[in-house]
Amino acid sequence: MSELKHDRIALPTGVALDVWTGGDPAHPAMIFLHGFPESHRTWRHQLPEFARDHFVIAPDQRGFARSDKPAEISAYAPDKVVADLIALADHFGLDRFTLVGHDWGGAASWMAALKRPDRVSQLIILNAPHPLIFQRTLIHDPAQRAASQYIRAFRNASLEAHIEGIGLDAFFDTSFARHADLARLAPEKAAYLDEWSQPGAITAMLNWYRASALEVPATDEQCDGPAFLHAPFPPVTQRTLVIWGVRDAALLPVQLDGLEALVPDLTLVRVDAGHFIPWEAPDEVNRAIRDWL
């Protein structure tokens, strides 16, 4: 990704982010948001491709790599992340933009599309569940609830001590063992370990889970779920592309059930890949985005 430009951008939200850009700023803008436990490098196969005819922007989000890491758990709540996104768009003078998100970046993208339709013109989601469907399935779908028990573990305050005890190298193996081919990841391992070894990075990344209002009951727990499950939920009004790796072991295909009712202008592309679809199936992802754009 040597053709991309790197800047350190201080935002009025109180954090400074490392941001990579590429392409002609006069072209239509695309902002790419990564998730856990990654960085802008999630998009290493997409940024050069779409910089050919778009202005692409990919931050290391708050808490990740060398971007700022506020100490308070509340600093990682979804509204703070969406505020970073809008401030970043303002920094580049963007009125409207296509938003692309994966994992936690996808969660932030769903939120941004719902809260700021005046700014998000089009939405592209990769293996990130719609908030209503995810919360509903965590309550009512036993398989999804079981698959999401890692969230409870990530919220455990003693996890950092465990990671320190086993070392980042072992954490790398266990983080990806269920979700990706470790041999395929080998060339990227040094980059991950460098990002995770930044002061406060592990806690900051985990704080995204701790700040979320998502209710994740234990597998044997009786739970009615939050009140919003039983109230009308607003539709996503933007034209939306969802690309889904169907072998995702954490986010099961049930996340797609009923999605069209919540996203009226939906294009859904299923891909034979796991959770980390941007780099597990880059050709399929790029083709799906290119065809849809």
Image (tube, rainbow, N blue to C red):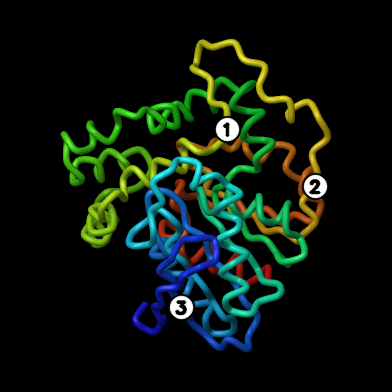
Q: Earlier in the sequence, mark 3 or mark 1?
A: 3
Q: CA distance from mark 2 to mark 1?
A: 19 Å
Q: Is disc 3 surrounded by few (<14), some (14 to 19) or many (20+) residues within 10 Å?
A: some
Q: Earlier in the sequence, mark 3 or mark 2?
A: 3
Residue 232's x, y, as percent?
Answer: 83, 35
Q: In this picture, is 47 found above or below 73?
A: below
Q: Is residue 77 left or right of residue 188?
A: right
Residue marked by disc 3: 48
Q: CA distance from mark 3 to mark 1?
A: 34 Å
* Amino acid on which disc 1 is placed: Leu
Residue 270 versus residue 249: which sits nearer the camera?
Answer: 249
* Amino acid on which disc 3 is placed: Pro
Q: Quadrant of the N terminus?
A: bottom left
The structure residue drawn at horizontal position 41% and vertical position 81%, both measured from the top left corner, is 4
Q: In this picture, is 28 found above or below 218?
A: below
The structure residue drawn at horizontal position 43% and vertical position 66%, both measured from the top left corner, is 17
| Secondary structure of the residue carrying numbered label 3 | helix
The structure residue drawn at horizontal position 43% and vertical position 43%, both measured from the top left corner, is 72
Disc number placed over residue 123 in the picture, else none? none
Residue marked by disc 2: 235
Residue marked by disc 1: 214
The structure residue drawn at horizontal position 46% and vertical position 64%, both measured from the top left corner, is 282
